Amino acid sequence: MKRLTVILLCLLGLSCVLKAQRITDASFRTVAHIKDDGTVQDASFRTALYFKSDGKIQDSSFRTVAYLKDDGTVQDASFRTLGHIKPDGTVQDSSFRTVGYIKKDGIVQDASFKTVGHADGIPPRWAAFLFFFL
């Protein structure tokens, strides 16, 4: 019902805002917002990145800065492997050393299981990139 209301308001030219999820640090301070369309904004709502449906990650000038491959591989713009995101949420560097975890409930932990942030409602691949590869 809420989504229908937003669509109707958009059609009427009123309050057309995409739903955004917050990315917070361990103390729940907002560090970023991610809209449903993959737009990443900083805490001040300035656009910083775009997660595209084809796995490209673009900066605010639409230059491709990284790739999230379907197999979980994370590559930079030159196609060098930066790391890997496993289906269970384990995040590894390019040498397959574990650097962190993205839990199903959105808690982000470092390799020592210390909570470093929260990304509830964010696709795990996006959260992993933001916390460990950005």
Image (cartoon, helix red, strand yellow):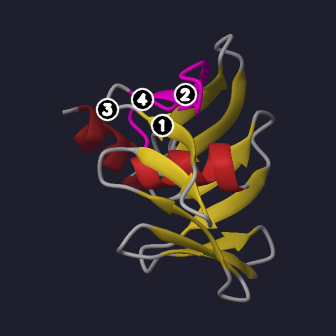
Q: In this orientation, does residue 36 appear? A: no
How far apart are the alpha carbons under marks 3 and 1?
A: 10 Å
How far apart are the alpha carbons under marks 4 and 3?
A: 5 Å
Which residue shows up at 64% across the image and 14% down it? Answer: 28
The quarter of the image holding the C terminus is bottom right
Label 2 amino acid?
A: Gln
Mark 3 or mark 1: which is in front? Answer: 1
Q: Residue furthest left?
A: 1
Mark 4 or mark 1: which is in front? Answer: 1
Q: Which residues are magenta?
A: 106-122
Choose between 133 and 123: the one closer to the eye: 133
Q: Residue furthest top?
A: 27
Q: Which residue is mark 1?
A: 101
Q: Which residue is mark 3?
A: 104
Which residue shows up at 60% across the image and 32% down it? Answer: 23
Sequence order check, earlier mark of 3 and 2: 3
Sequence order check, earlier mark of 4 and 1: 1
Query: Are the two marked residues, 3 and 2, in contact with CB atoms closer than 8 angstroms?
Result: no
Q: Which residue is mark 4?
A: 106
How far apart are the alpha carbons under marks 3 and 2?
A: 12 Å
Q: Is residue 28 left or right of residue 11?
A: right
Q: Is residue 64 above or below residue 129?
A: below
Q: Is residue 108 left or right of residue 79?
A: left
The mark found on residue 109 in the picture is 2
**Among the 4 quarters of the image, the one containing residue 129:** bottom right
Q: Secondary structure at mark 1?
A: strand
- Residue 22: image x %, image y %? 56, 31
